[in-house]
Image (spheres, helix red, strand yellow):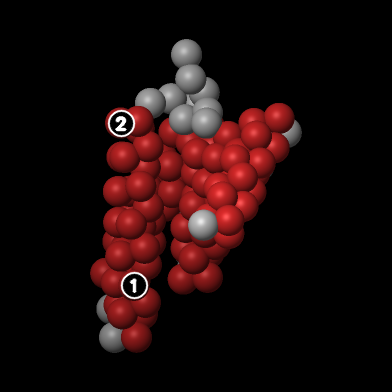
Amino acid sequence: MKAKRTIIKLILLVIMLAKAYPIEAAPIRTVDETSIKTIGEAQRAVDHAWDVYHIAALSGTLSSPQVQTQIESDLHTARTQLVEAKDAAKMKNQKRLTEKLAQIDQITQRVVQQSQEKKQ
């Protein structure tokens, strides 16, 4: 029982610190870079989108619970698309790989943008 209280106190402390010292995430690409071109870039884009989302969620700055639900759904979709992109690469299906990478690119850009929108 005491361990449970300690864990709860630690979680509350982390939340308070996140609110006191908000972290702004940098964009994953510069404006002149047009799209994700490799599986590695896609993996990094998905990881970055998760990181930006987690920072916003922990600091309580997401614009609404509906946005949070949509972002979580999009992030899970991006992970699924990443697995499908890896499968397409293994099967040497360039057309499908390109489609999957484009979908991942769209999803991760949307997630980062929505995660950085502040409450009104």
- Residue at horizontal 61 percent and vertical 45 percent from the top: 9
Q: List the residue tagged with mark 1.
A: 83
From this viewpoint, which residue is outermost toward the front?
Answer: 1
| Amino acid at pointer 1 | Val
Q: Nearer the viewer, residue 17 or 53?
A: 17
**Residue 109, percent across and down?**
45, 43
| Left or right, 57 with reference to 28 | left
**Residue 119, percent across and down?**
48, 20
Distance Cα–Cα, label 2 vs label 1: 26 Å
| Amino acid at pointer 2 | Gln
* 106 is higher (above) or lower (below) than 59: below
- Residue at horizontal 73 percent and vertical 33 percent from the top: 21
* Label disc, if present, on residue 66 of the rendered structure: 2
User: Across the whole image, how many numbered discs are drawn on residues?
Assistant: 2
Label 1: element kind: helix
| Mark nearer the viewer, 2 or 1 | 2
